[in-house]
Image: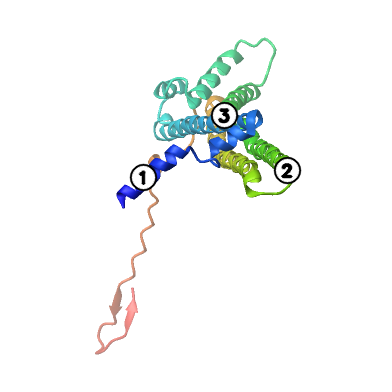
Amino acid sequence: MITTILAAATNGAAAGENPYGLWAALEQGGTIAWTVFLILCAFSIVSFYIMFTKLFEQQKVINQAKRVRTGFWTSNSLREGAAKLEKNSAYRQIVDDGIQAQDQHAKLTDPVEAHDWLHGSLARSEAAINAKLGTGLAFLATVGATAPFIGLFGTVIGIYRALIKIGAAGQASIDAVAGPVGEALIMTALGLAVAVPAVLAYNWLQRRNKSIAEDLSAFSNDVLGFLASNGAVRPALASKTAPVTKPAAPAKPAATTTAGQTGGVQTKA
């Protein structure tokens, strides 16, 4: 049995490669087929690169948010709290921009409301962080929208070549159309295989960016309240919340018995 399998494999190798495989279809398709194939491969590689890099950046910001909730607001000042945060991090950038805006407001010659000045500076910092997190997502959307049509272009060329072979042969034989039709189906499958992961990654990363933007907005608002109140207003920490104790139930009055009578009546004191 093993000898028969090895002999068949040897005969197959000697006979040559599969004439209807991927590489054979690309060779038959010529320059157009190879161009479509390389474009789709490039789209796929860049899409996965963006997906993993954005995922790493988002997870880094999410971990920073956890550290902010646990230790930042226990500091006596924003500068002390900023020292606890990682340099060049998203939350550190918001704090540094808020402190810088407060220092710059004292140097303004034209009177501007401190609240408006601080709010604008923090909003600008928050928008810069969100813009950085959103870089590359437009490419994923573009790939998801255009990859199926690029594959469809290869499909149309493959069917066109099949029709030309049928016209040249004078009859629609399987041998004449199998190669071009197979190439057409391969291009359609490649277009879908590139587009579907890109669309899924785009929607998933956009949802995570929205959640991060909400956390950054809440933190920016807390920093604004801290600066506008000179440290008097800060978010409440769950660890510092005193437990609520229930009031003690009132004691029941003792019962007494009327003296001088057997089986006297009990009266309340």
Q: Report the disc number at residue 7.
A: 1
Mark 2 neighbour class, 10 Å CA radius: few under 14, some 14 to 19, many 20 or more: some
Q: Using the rendered image of the protein, determine whether residue 205 is visible from the camera's viewpoint.
A: no
Q: Mark 2 vs mark 3: which is more N-terminal?
A: 3
Could you say whether the residue bearing mark 2 is in a helix, strand or loop? helix
Mark nearest the camera among 1 and 2 is: 1
Image quadrant containing the C terminus? bottom left
Rounded to the nearest angstrom, the CA distance separating label 1 from label 2 is 38 Å
* Residue with the mark numbered 2: 163
**How far across and how far down the image is residue 2, in percent?**
30, 49
Mark nearest the camera among 3 and 1 is: 1
Identify whether 93 is placed above or below 106.
Answer: below
- Which of the two residues, 147 or 91, is positioned nearer the viewer here? 147
**How far across and how far down the image is residue 111, in percent?**
69, 15
**How far across and how far down the image is residue 12, in percent?**
44, 42
Q: Mark 3 vs mark 1: which is more N-terminal?
A: 1
Q: Residue at x 63, y 35 (%)?
A: 141
Could you say whether the residue bearing mark 1 is in a helix, strand or loop? helix
* Residue with the mark numbered 3: 42
Q: Using the rendered image of the protein, determine whether residue 119 is visible from the camera's viewpoint.
A: yes
Q: Are marks 3 and 1 in contact (CB under 8 Å)?
A: no
Q: Residue at x 61, y 10 (%)?
A: 107
In the image, is 253 to the left or to the right of 40?
left
Q: Residue at x 55, y 29 (%)?
A: 46
Q: Mark 1 vs mark 2: which is more N-terminal?
A: 1
Rounded to the nearest angstrom, the CA distance separating label 2 from label 3 is 30 Å
